Image (spheres, rainbow, N blue to C red):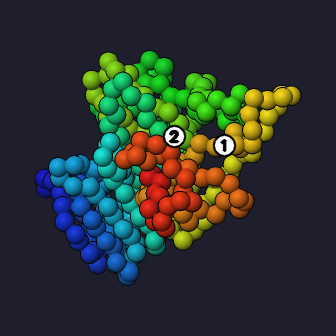
Amino acid sequence: MKQKLSILLLGLIPVCMATAQSPMSVYGPINVGTGGSMISQGPVTINSNSSQGTGVVTNNGTINFSKGLILKSDDANDGLLANKATITTSGSAVSEIQLQKTFADKRYYYVSFPFTVKMSEIKSGTGTALTYDTQYYMMEYDAASRPNTGNANSWKDLVVDANSTLVPGKGYLFALDEDMVNREVIFPASDITNLFSTATANKTINLSYYTPTIQNPFTTAKSWGWNFVGGLTTSNYAMTQANLGYTGFLYYYSNSAKDYIEVATQLPGSATMPP
């Protein structure tokens, strides 16, 4: 009986034809060139690790993730998959396509997802199901109330039932309970429709223009129409390329500046939205 070993990839590898039958961990850049292919018969993990390196897979050829794909993220880095050609997942269960992130305690994070997530399937790094409002907490932005109140911190708790899902492209606040010892959280996909469409394909986030619903609101037009959104891809998205279809404001949160920065003031490619 053959022993299966994990494959650890650390360097720059232009892949023409590669087949991996064992679990694959990516800690560096990999480029699948035009006409090339990569077929994985074991789960692939694209890692984020400050000491070992961050995995970035760029596909210009064909990749098949037949036993699952895990994109890891921490406070410093994100494992990234940039698709410019063809990716398939034949052989993988949808739930084997996952995001995994390590969360610090006593802190809320901005999060979003490029695929639908069933809240009942969110797990700890040990694989144990997590309970909402006990082991983790989430809030959504109440953009509809802001035009009435002018309160920029218009957050509200999620109303959750057994069928609740997290929507692709929508932003949330997330916190893991401070008593949780294992700080890694697994977000399995429940629907990956259009997830691996190519980089040139348009992806749409539906926005709402919220206006006051009361007479004499405590606001001006600057408080109207806000939406809290996230990425729809498994790679960074250059927000300077966003086609809003109207003249409006687009801001992103800069970890380095610890503030919101208007995209229009940034050089092309400098304002990015992580997955």
- SS at badge 1: loop
Camera-side residue: 218 or 60? 218
Whether tag 1 and tag 2 are in contact, CB under 8 A, the answer is no
Q: Nearer the viewer, residue 272 or 206?
A: 272
Amino acid type indicated by mark 1: Trp
In this figure, what is the number of numbered marks?
A: 2
Q: Which residue is mark 1?
A: 226
Which SS class for mark 2?
Answer: strand
Residue found at x 75% / y 29%:
218
Image mark for residue 137: none
Q: Is residue 18 left or right of residue 233?
A: left
Q: Which residue is mark 2?
A: 117
Q: Give residue 248's position: percent from left, percent from top.
A: 68, 54
Q: Position of residue 227 (x, y in %)?
A: 64, 43
Residue 174 in sight from this viewpoint = yes
Q: Nearer the viewer, residue 137 or 25?
A: 137
Residue depicted at x 55% and y 53%: 262
Residue under the image location 29 percent in, 78 percent down: 16
Q: Residues within 10 Å of mark 1 (few under 14, many from 20)?
A: many
